[in-house]
Amino acid sequence: MSEKDTIFALSSGRPPAAISVVRISGPQAHRAAERMAGSLPEPRTAAMRELREPSTGELLDEAIVLRFDSPASSTGEDIVEFQCHGGRAVVDAVHSALGGIEGLRQAEPGEFTRRAFENGRIDLTEAEGLADLLEAETESQRRAALTLAEGGLRRQIGLWQERLLALSARAERAIDYDEEDREIDHALASDREALAAELRLWLERPRVEPLKDGIRVVVAGPPNAGKSSLINAIAGEERAIVTDIPGTTRDHIEVPLSLGGIPLLLTDTAGLRETDDKVEAIGVARAAQLVEGAEVLVWLGGPADATAHPRLICVHARADLPDRGPIPNGSIAVSSVTREGVDRLLERIEQMAQSFLPGEDALALNRRQAQLIEEAADAIARVDLSGDVVLVAEDLRLARSAFDRLTGRSGVEDVLDALFGRFCLGK
């Protein structure tokens, strides 16, 4: 695949639609567009043009044409966009005409964004944010992804890099000029400690994974406690089998939900009890593991029997039954039949789930980003100012290397294919 290829693809939703946007990017973009649309408008100016098949002159459509010149474009290359009518036949005809022009080929998934990255229009953290934005299904996912895609982390990394470069410059100067004792001034020690401490604080922030995967809310308790009925009441549909036979739920059932813009993974589990049934015993063991790994635990059973958990919600289930008994202190009375208490339970779940989420408009690191920031923090903290200043300079260089990999300047070839493969064809 040549880096000089000019690529094209549908960059809007799949037809039929009111409007479809076909994007062309690369060194032949303007020439190819002129063959179909005639003269192009001035850069960043929209104009109506007739699109024609270059080989026959056949009219394909009337479209709005937009032109962007390198390097002031989203990919850093020459770009032309055709805003066509959104019928399948129109889009197919435009694609067929573009594919017949020498030097053009259809783009691969994520190739427009990859060119933007390779041409320095965005860094790797912004590309990751854009991928998350395209996949966002809840409001909290959208906000976190947009903050990253708009360059929030890139700007913060730039500030860290400036401070780290200043530290490295002072260390290198000590190598060159302080040949007798090679002492590093106290300011270097103070600045090093402050930067390492700031990176550690960032590592303590809520991560993006709970936003993407959903915060696991596990519903647990003894058999026949009403767990599956509660799951169905919350989901608004029959997702779990409900009978009066103990041990009906043999394996866990996961129900993805969005609660107040927060993604949740509501999990029904097997009743916790001793059993001689081998299949049920496997389900009970899995339930115990899920309880241990739950971000929020909803317990349907006696409060005294509840597993110790930092985010425990005790539920007094089947509250509509006349012989149910008094509500234990601290428990929420809930009926899956009348929906009494369900809204209150959901409010409590939402409050507890919030602790796993970044604050509004705050940056949330993904696993790759956190690992590299931790690597930089470790290298900075490892600096021994009482030791050889050459080793000091080397540790600071390792920290700079971690930041370079964080933004995609170096050492990320193994990341790129997986990342841009997440994008749709015209992005």
Image (cartoon, rainbow, N blue to C red):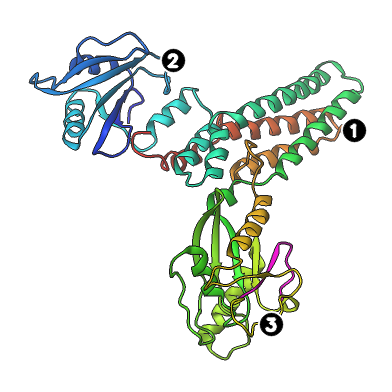
Check disc 2 and report the residue beneath it: 72
- The image quarter containing residue 290 is bottom right
Q: Which residues are magenta?
A: 306-317
Question: Which residue does the image show at 56% across and 31% down from the upper left?
Answer: 410
Is label 3 in contact with label 2 (beta carbons under 8 Å)? no
Say which residue appears at 43% left-offset and 66% top-offset: 237
Quadrant in which the C terminus appears: top left
- The residue at the point 71 percent across, 62 percent down is 311
Q: Amino acid at mark 3?
A: Gly
> Whole-percent x and y of residue 170?
80, 20
Label placed on residue 132: none
x, y (%) of residue 82?
27, 23
Foreground residue among 165 and 238: 238
Question: Which class describes the residues within 10 Å of circle 2: few (<14), some (14-19), or many (20+)?
Answer: some
Q: Position of residue 277 (x, y in %)?
A: 53, 89
Q: Is residue 267 magenta?
A: no
Asked if marks 2 and 1 touch (Cβ < 8 Å), the reply is no
- Dot 3: few (<14), some (14–19), or many (≥20) neighbours within 10 Å? few
